[in-house]
Image (cartoon, grey):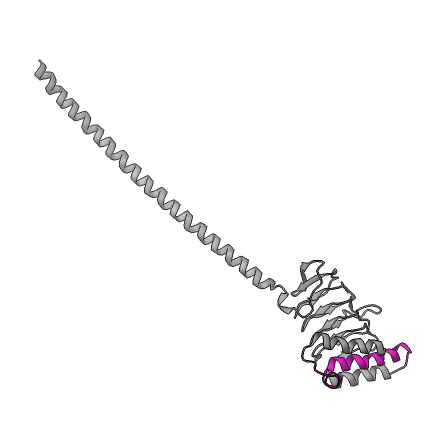
Amino acid sequence: MFRSLKSDFAIIKERDPAARGFWETILCYPGFQAISIHRISHKLWKYNLPILPRLLSQITRFLTGVEIHPGARIGAGVFIDHGMGVVIGETSEIGDRCLLYQGVTLGGTGKETGKRHPTLAANVVVGAGAKVLGGIHIGTNTRIGAGSVVVKNVEANSTVVGIPGRIVHQSGVTINPLAHSALPDTEANVLRNLMERIDQLESDILGLQDLIGNIEMNRRNKKKDIIIGESQNLKDKEIIEFIGDDLNNDNN
C-alpha cells in the first residue's frame, strides 16, 4: 500500500506543474487524498469488515467530492485531477498510471450482480465529465475525450469521443496524457467537410450555369447565321437570275 501511495505522490509531481511541494500535494489535492483513504478502505473491504469501509468512503466523499466504492481496485500511480464529482463504482478496475479528470463516472448499467463496472487498462486518460458505463474494457494507452459516453469495449491505443463514444483514431504511438489539444474535433471535421462539399457544389452549379448560357448563346448565333445565310442565298439566286436574264438578252 505504501508503495502505491509513493507512486500516487510521484505521478502528481510528474503530471501537474502546479504541484510545488510535499505538503501542498498532501493537503491541497483532493484526488490524492481520496485515493489514499480508498487504499485503506479497500484493505478493510477485503477483510469483509461491515460498515466501516463504506463509512470511510462516505467521509471521503464529503471531504473531497470524490466517491470511490471501497470494492474498486485502483493500481499504482493513478491521478484524479481536480477530483470534484468523480464516481468510481464497486467493481471498477483502474490500471497503473491512469489519469481521471473532474466529473468522470465509472458506473454500472442495470441491477445485475457481478462485474458491472468498467475496467481501465494502464495509462488510460479519461477527460472531464466523461462517462464509462458497464462491465466493458478500455485498452491500454487509450484517451477518452471530455463529455464522452462510452458503453462498448475499446481496443488499446485508441482515441474515443462523442455520445455514444466513437473510436476516431487508433495507432501504436504512446500518447501524452496532457496533450488535450491533440484530441480530434469530429464535429468540426464534419462541418468542415460539409462546407467544402457545399463550396464544391456551388462551384459546379456556377459552371453548369455558364455552360448552359454559352449553349443558349451559341444556339441563338447559329440560328441567326442560318437565317442570314438562307436570306443571302435567296437574294443571290434572285440577283443571278436577274443578271442572267439580262446577260442572256444582251447576248441575244
Rendered residue at 18%/29% (across/down): 235
Q: Is residue 169 left or right of residue 2?
A: left
Q: Is residue 50 left or right of residue 96?
A: right
- Outermost residue, right side: 47
Residue 67 location, x and y as percent? 76, 79
- Comparing 182 with 93, the one in front is 182
- Comparing 81 with 24, the one in front is 24
Residue 47 location, x and y as percent? 91, 78
> Can residue 244 be seen at all in this image of the molecule?
yes
Q: Is residue 38 left or right of residue 144?
A: right
Q: Is residue 104 above or below residue 137?
A: below
Asked which quadrant contains residue 94, the reply is: bottom right
Asked which quadrant contains residue 239, the reply is: top left
The chief SS type of the magenta part is helix
Query: Which stretch is magenta?
Result: 19-48
Rendered residue at 67%/59% (across/down): 169
> Can residue 69 be seen at all in this image of the molecule?
no
